[in-house]
Image (tube, helix red, strand yellow):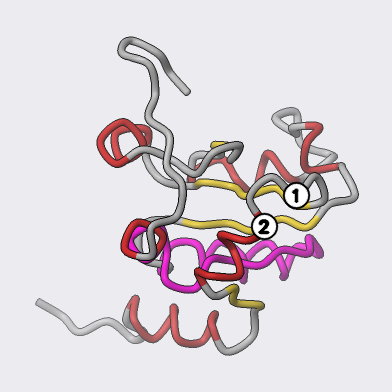
C-alpha cells in the first residue's frame, strides 16, 4: 500500500498543538455549569454501549461543521448560544480534528484532551440511554 503524505496521528498532533485541550478533572468539574456545553461527537452505538456525560449534547461527527454554521440549513440553535463548547470523542483524536476544523471556521471551542475513556477511568458521571431510546 502506498504511504500517505500525512498520517492521521500527524494530523491529530498538529491539531492538538493549536487548540485548547481540557484535562479530564477540569471537564468533570464543568458538568452542570450552565455556561458550558459538552458536545459528544461519538457514534450513537458508542453512546449506547458506553453511556454519555450527563447533560451532554450529541452532535454526530459527520454533521458538526453543518450544525455550527448559522448559514447552513442544518444549523442547530444551541451552537448560536454564548457558551463554552467542549467537544469529546472516545480518545481525543476525533475531537481534536473537529475542534481544529471549527477553529478554522471561526467557531470557538475546546476538547476533552483524552476523551471519554479518560472520563470513565477518572470516575466521571455517566448516564445510559433508556432501552429503545435514542438519546
> Is residue 125 located in the magenta-colored stretch of the structure?
no
Above or below 131: residue 86: below
User: Where does the image place residue 79, in percent across and percent down from the top left?
Assistant: 78, 43
Q: Which residue is mark 1?
A: 33
- Depth order, front residue of 93/8: 93
> Is residue 101 located in the magenta-colored stretch of the structure?
yes
From the viewer's perspective, is 73 left or right of 51? right
User: Where does the image place residue 3, in percent across and percent down from the top left?
Assistant: 20, 84
Q: Which residue is mark 2?
A: 30
In percent of the image, x 61 and y 70: which residue is there?
26
User: Where does the image place residue 7, in percent across and percent down from the top left?
Assistant: 32, 81
In percent of the image, x 33 and y 10: which residue is there?
132
**Residue bounds of the magenta highlight:** 93-118
Residue occupying the far left of the picture? 1
In percent of the image, x 54 and y 36: which residue is there?
58
In percent of the image, x 9 and y 76: which residue is there?
1
> Which type of secondary structure does the marked residue at label 2 adopt?
helix
Label 2 close to label 1 by CB (< 8 Å) = yes
Q: Residues within 10 Å of mark 2 (few under 14, many from 20)?
A: some
Amino acid at each position: 500500500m502506498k504511504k500517505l503524505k500525512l498520517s492521521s496521528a500527524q494530523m491529530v498532533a498538529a491539531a492538538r498543538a493549536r487548540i485548547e485541550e481540557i484535562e479530564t478533572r477540569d471537564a468533570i468539574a464543568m458538568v452542570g455549569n450552565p455556561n458550558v456545553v459538552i458536545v459528544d461527537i461519538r457514534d450513537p452505538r458508542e453512546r449506547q454501549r458506553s453511556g454519555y456525560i450527563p447533560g451532554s449534547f450529541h452532535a454526530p461527527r459527520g454533521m458538526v461543521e453543518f450544525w455550527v454554521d448559522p448559514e447552513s440549513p442544518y444549523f442547530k440553535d444551541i451552537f448560536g448560544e454564548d457558551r463554552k463548547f467542549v467537544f469529546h470523542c472516545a480518545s481525543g483524536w476525533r475531537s481534536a480534528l473537529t475542534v481544529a476544523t471549527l477553529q478554522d471556521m471561526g467557531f470557538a471551542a475546546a476538547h476533552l484532551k483524552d476523551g471519554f475513556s479518560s472520563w470513565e477511568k477518572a470516575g466521571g458521571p455517566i448516564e445510559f440511554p433508556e432501552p429503545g431510546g435514542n438519546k
